[in-house]
């Protein structure tokens, strides 16, 4: 009895001694992993953040934007190779990569280039939005197998990515604390010796500077009095002037530092989140979840009722608007009637795309449901034709604006995406998100590269020779500097309706650009569109001339 008690006590004591060792070993491995991550990821993220700040601080559309896009891809590609064990099948950005991955990389670079060639605020906004979306999809494709993901799964994945980056935003602090703890565990004697040596070197260098500075001053005075050429050289070097406003300097330095620090934390947090295996598995499980599989009769009932309304509306469009058999309401012109219904039709087309995708995702699809959905898609195309017809009638009367050209582009893109939706009805495994992203991305890059403001100004100026209701006020005040080549080609002198509208074309914008490009780092702001407008002198007419301005 006594021996068994002694034996049990000995076993309990051994277990108590071994348990801290196991825990310490596990914690030590975890600390070493964080310390290694800080060494590998910290320097690269800091350099990338500094380069980003140099390229883009107060410079949203300068010549440095393509370099930022390229540096982003290089930074991303380098660290995906470093953390290859947690990545999905594709790690390379180009060599051996799929055509879809190459498209994402090429599109990012092209958007970076386009940003320094345009002055249009709308183009710049959507260029940057699309660039950010493409980078997000590139990140998802690197750490997840997205081949079977739906549009909803991609959107959820991007949302999880944004939340994950926020959750890991303080990871550098945790990794730095882990590195310090590892440093203490490895022994303090050697570290204390290194610290003492560093302090000794610092003290010696400080003493040397204190001795050398007054000695150099004395030597400069003696050598300057000995040779007049050397004296003039020293005076030229030391008598420079700097126009510095201390408040502006402090503000810009603090703002640039904040931007660099913020981007460092974001870049660091991105790789910390993406390399967590538990997070990767959670996102994969979320993406593979299927819809509810609701009864198909619910979807058929809804679809048939919606389809009936669309068929009646389509009949009105065919016999009324297209064939000209409709009598307009009193007080309406065809142009006013066209404008009144355009945006509503576009919104209905978008609703139809979402409706069909929800039916396919959350309901059991049979032959009847697919047939009705095909009819809805056909009605959608008819609505697009109606919207296009209305828009062309309005353009024929009031000519082009950026909003109208963007609407034409939107109708074309909706038609292409709807074609993908039709394919998805008959082929459930069709990669609709990939198709839509490539289609929309390609169409937008072409639209942005075409500089629509140039074509708007060119068309409206050509129409001004024969029409009296061309809005020359709009050309001068609403279009960006992308329109300048059209004005130079037409040798057109602007007519101002008010006194302040006369004079040089967008003089204030050109002057701001010229001021930005001055100075040591002014080259960062170089923009091809603004540089062209700045190099060409476009004058207005006298105050006695009046502009044509649409009501």
Image (tube, rainbow, N blue to C red):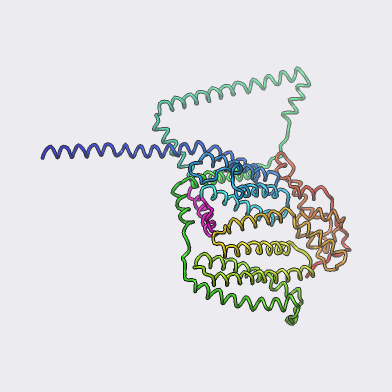
Residue 295, image x, y percentages: 47, 71
Foreground pick, 304 / 366: 366
- Tell me which residue sits at (63%, 77%) in the image: 311
State which region is magenta. 145-170
Depicted 321 relative to depicted 15: above or below: below
Foreground pick, 58 / 435: 435
Depicted 121 relative to depicted 205: above or below: below
Foreground pick, 191 / 502: 191
Does 150 lie within the magenta span?
yes
- Tell me which residue sits at (47%, 69%) in the image: 294
**Quadrant where the N terminus is found in the figure:** top left
- Please identify the quarter of the rendering in which residue 229 is found: top right
**Quadrant where the C terminus is found in the figure:** bottom right
* View extreme (front): residue: 367
Foreground pick, 77 / 263: 77
Residue 454, image x, y percentages: 78, 56
* View extreme (top): residue: 226
Residue 204, image x, y percentages: 54, 22
Depicted 345 relative to depicted 68: above or below: below
Residue 330, image x, y percentages: 74, 82
- Tell me which residue sits at (61%, 66%) in the image: 350
Q: Main secondary structure of the magenta part?
A: helix
């Amino acid at each position: 009895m006594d021996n068994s008690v002694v034996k049990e006590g000995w076993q309990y004591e051994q277990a108590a001694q071994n348990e801290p060792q196991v825990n310490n070993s596990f914690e030590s491995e975890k600390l070493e992993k964080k310390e290694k991550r800080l060494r590998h990821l910290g320097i690269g993220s800091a350099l990338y953040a500094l380069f980003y700040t140099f390229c883009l601080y107060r410079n949203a559309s300068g010549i440095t934007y393509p370099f930022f896009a390229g540096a982003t891809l290089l930074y991303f590609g380098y660290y995906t190779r470093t953390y290859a064990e947690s990545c999905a099948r594709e790690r390379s950005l180009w060599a051996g990569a799929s055509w879809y991955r190459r498209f994402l990389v090429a599109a990012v670079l092209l958007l970076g280039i386009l940003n320094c060639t345009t002055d249009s605020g709308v183009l710049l906004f959507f260029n940057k939005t699309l660039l950010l979306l493409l980078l997000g999809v590139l990140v998802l494709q690197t750490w997840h197998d997205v081949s079977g993901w739906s549009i909803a799964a991609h959107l959820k994945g991007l949302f999880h990515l944004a939340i994950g980056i926020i959750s890991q935003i303080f990871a550098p602090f945790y990794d730095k604390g882990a590195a310090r703890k590892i440093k203490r565990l490895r022994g303090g004697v050697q570290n204390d010796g290194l610290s003492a040596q560093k302090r000794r070197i610092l003290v010696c260098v400080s003493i040397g500077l204190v001795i050398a500075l007054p000695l150099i001053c004395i030597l400069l005075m003696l050598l300057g009095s000995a040779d007049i050429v050397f004296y003039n050289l020293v005076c030229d070097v030391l008598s420079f002037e700097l126009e510095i406003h201390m408040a502006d300097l402090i503000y810009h330095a603090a703002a640039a530092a904040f931007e660099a620090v913020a981007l460092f934390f974001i870049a660091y947090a991105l790789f910390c989140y993406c390399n967590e295996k538990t997070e990767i598995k959670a996102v994969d499980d979320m993406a593979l979840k299927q819809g509810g599989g609701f009864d198909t009769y619910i979807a058929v009932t809804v679809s048939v009722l919606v389809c009936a309304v669309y068929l009646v509306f389509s009949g009105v469009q065919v016999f009324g608007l297209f064939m000209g058999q409709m009598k307009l309401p009193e007080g309406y012109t065809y142009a006013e009637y066209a404008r009144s219904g355009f945006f509503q039709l576009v919104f209905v087309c978008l609703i139809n795309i979402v409706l069909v995708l929800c039916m396919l995702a959350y309901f059991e699809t049979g032959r009847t449901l697919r047939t009705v959905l095909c009819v809805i898609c056909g009605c959608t195309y008819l609505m697009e034709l109606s919207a296009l017809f209305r828009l062309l009638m309005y353009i024929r009367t009031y000519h082009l604006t950026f909003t109208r050209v963007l609407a034409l582009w939107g109708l074309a893109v909706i038609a292409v995406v709807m074609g993908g939706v039709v394919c998805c009805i008959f082929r459930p495994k069709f990669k609709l998100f990939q198709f839509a992203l490539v289609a929309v991305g390609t169409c937008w890059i072409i639209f942005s590269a075409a500089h629509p403001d140039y074509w708007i100004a060119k068309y409206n100026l050509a129409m001004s020779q024969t029409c009296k209701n061309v809005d020359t006020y709009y050309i001068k005040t609403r279009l960006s500097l992308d329109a300048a080549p059209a004005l130079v080609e037409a040798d057109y002198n602007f007519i101002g309706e008010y006194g302040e509208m006369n004079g040089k074309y967008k003089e204030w914008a050109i002057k701001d650009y010229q001021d930005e490009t001055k100075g040591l780092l002014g080259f960062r702001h170089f923009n091809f569109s603004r540089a062209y407008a700045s190099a060409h002198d476009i004058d207005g007419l006298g105050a006695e001339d009046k502009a044509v301005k649409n009501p």
